[in-house]
């Protein structure tokens, strides 16, 4: 690898998915993995195979598609974990086993209850075993930023001698600051023999809001791999944001004099895909991919922009895959115009997906005068879930007044051809519709969160609803879109119900994906 090249290690499917409510289905993970491949990431950490049979299945499915990037799986320093990672990732032409063990004093004493020598012995044994199975082995000393410097150097030296090809230095709890982290990396570069023979990596959490800054400090000090996630999702306050660190390196190229292999025009559509699948909406003021990232409201800013865009824009919207245009199509627009606009927005759909999305577009165009880019994006993101499950929304009718409870009449179609209908009452139309859906499907749940976002502008904007519910001690998330809020909410609720019913059909052999093993973090 060239010393002026920074590898991008994406852990959206592993560390990112560990954020509360961000779990994905196998199909969703495959969609994200394909998008990451198109984005040009170097390594995809596809999951933690030992966490559950479902996690193993997902990592194996991604590896077997052999998408191009290195496919990596995470393992604790024990033989069973390592063997499961190898079995899961071996289908990829380029694969990696990533092992970790905690090294800080607080972890050694309170979590592992191991002496320093025992931790090193565990790491060395795991790395050697992994190298027998795979030529590409990464090692992470968990909580490295709070580990004694001299001991950390000793651990890293032992890892290199054992055969690690990449050594990652994680700020596991987002504790460090840029100047301190810079010193840590320079210390390792000075005190660890053969450190130039391996790739030095960095993995930062965002608990103090400095994950990107700390990652860039590490790069300045010699790290040549950055571990990050799309939209910065992850446990607690999240991880280093992929789009932010990539665009910092690109926009400030004269300062860093480094490059990545990322196709930055794919950043915005990949961000939207992950946001839609996880239900984690991107804040309007989010750097790079937020709705306001290229918006200018202040008069002096608008005047400067009209004179020359560089007065208030250090990046072009096109650089991250965001189009300048907004109003795009109407009810008379044809299939070719729709397909062209989808491509301009950065999405690649096959013929089946295009036809399905186009039918949804035509339905929407009949309901509203103008269809905007945000509407098109919402259609694309939600078209996949519209047909996944035994139940389909056929018709919805609601009645409300200020003096009486709201009522909703819901008609559903089952995949076996059965049609059912129910009328229910509630404190509002959403509550009434959800009550009817529970009665019709026999699935009871507790609503925990209901989020509504506008996909575009105007009174007839397409609404995106995300709901989170509890059922049998598990959380489920669903999403739906419509110009009618009640219909959007009902579609989101029905997606949740379908997910619950699909899960009930699975065998009981799959363990709980929220178990402690799947919560391992570095």
Image: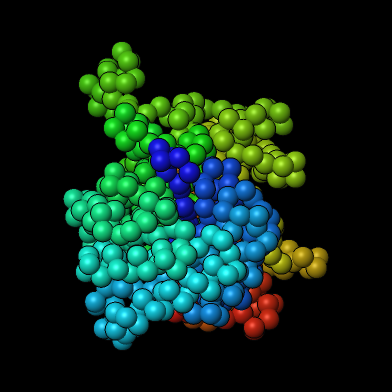
In the shown orientation, is residue 143 left or right of residue 58?
A: left
Residue located at (71% from left, 28% from top):
336
Q: Nearer the viewer, residue 212 or 93?
A: 93
In the shown orientation, is residue 134 left or right of residue 261?
A: right
Q: Furthest residue to the left?
A: 179
In this view, 186 is above or below 493? above
The colour scheme is rainbow
Q: Furthest residue to the top?
A: 307
Where's residue 119, x and y in %? Answer: 35, 78
| Res. 250 image quadrant | top left
Residue located at (56% from left, 28% from top):
328
| Res. 158 image quadrant | bottom left
In the shown orientation, is residue 518 left or right of residue 63?
A: left
Residue located at (27% from left, 18% from top):
304
Q: Nearer the viewer, residue 207 or 258?
A: 258
Where's residue 63, x and y in %? Answer: 64, 59
In the shown orientation, is residue 42 left or right of residue 212?
A: right
Q: Quadrant of the image for the C terminus? A: bottom left
């Amino acid at each position: 690898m060239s010393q002026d090249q920074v590898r991008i290690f994406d852990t959206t499917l592993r560390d990112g998915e560990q954020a509360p409510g961000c779990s994905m289905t196998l199909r969703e993970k495959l969609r994200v993995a394909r998008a990451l491949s198109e984005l040009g990431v170097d390594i995809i950490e596809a999951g933690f195979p030992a966490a559950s049979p479902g996690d193993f299945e997902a990592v194996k499915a991604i590896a077997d598609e052999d998408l191009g990037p290195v496919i990596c799986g995470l393992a604790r320093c024990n033989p069973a974990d390592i063997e499961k990672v190898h079995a899961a990732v071996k289908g990829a032409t380029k694969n990696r086993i990533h092992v970790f063990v905690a090294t800080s004093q607080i972890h050694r004493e309170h979590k592992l209850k191991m002496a320093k020598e025992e931790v090193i012995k565990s790491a060395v044994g795991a790395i050697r075993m992994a190298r027998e199975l795979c030529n590409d082995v990464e090692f992470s000393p968990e909580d490295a930023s709070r580990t004694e410097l001299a001991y950390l150097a000793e651990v890293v030296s032992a890892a290199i001698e054992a055969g690690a090809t990449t050594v990652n230095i994680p700020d596991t709890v987002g504790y460090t600051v840029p100047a301190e982290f810079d010193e840590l990396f320079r210390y390792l570069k000075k005190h660890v023999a053969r450190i130039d023979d391996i790739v030095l990596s960095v993995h930062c959490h965002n608990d103090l809001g400095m994950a990107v800054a700390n990652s860039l400090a590490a790069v300045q000090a010699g790290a040549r791999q950055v571990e990050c996630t799309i939209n910065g999702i992850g446990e607690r306050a999240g991880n280093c944001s992929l789009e932010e660190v990539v665009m910092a390196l690109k926009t400030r190229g004269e300062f860093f004099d480094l490059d990545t292999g990322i196709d930055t025009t794919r950043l915005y559509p990949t961000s939207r895909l992950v946001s839609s699948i996880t239900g984690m909406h991107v804040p309007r003021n989010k750097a790079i991919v937020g709705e306001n990232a290229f918006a200018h409201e202040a008069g002096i800013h608008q005047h400067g922009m009209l004179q020359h865009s560089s007065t208030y824009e250090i990046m072009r919207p096109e650089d991250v895959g965001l189009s300048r245009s907004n109003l795009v199509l109407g009810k008379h627009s044809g299939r070719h115009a729709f397909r062209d606009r989808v491509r301009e927005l950065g999405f690649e759909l096959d013929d089946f997906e295009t036809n399905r999305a186009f039918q949804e577009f035509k339905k929407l165009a009949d309901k509203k005068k103008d269809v905007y880019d945000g509407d098109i994006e919402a259609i694309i993101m939600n078209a996949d879930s519209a047909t996944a499950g035994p139940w389909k929304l056929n018709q919805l009718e609601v009645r409300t007044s200020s003096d009486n409870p709201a009522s909703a009449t819901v008609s559903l179609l089952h995949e076996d051809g059965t049609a059912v209908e129910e009328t229910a009452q509630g404190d509002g139309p959403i509550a009434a519709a959800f009550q009817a859906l529970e009665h019709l499907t026999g699935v009871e749940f507790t609503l925990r969160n209901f989020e509504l976002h506008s996909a575009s502008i105007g009174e007839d904007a397409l609404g995106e609803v995300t709901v989170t519910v509890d059922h049998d001690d598990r959380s489920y998330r669903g999403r739906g879109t419509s110009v009618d809020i009640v219909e959007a909410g009902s579609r989101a609720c029905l997606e949740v119900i379908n997910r619950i019913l699909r899960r009930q059909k699975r065998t009981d052999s799959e363990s709980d994906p929220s178990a402690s093993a799947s919560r391992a973090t570095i």
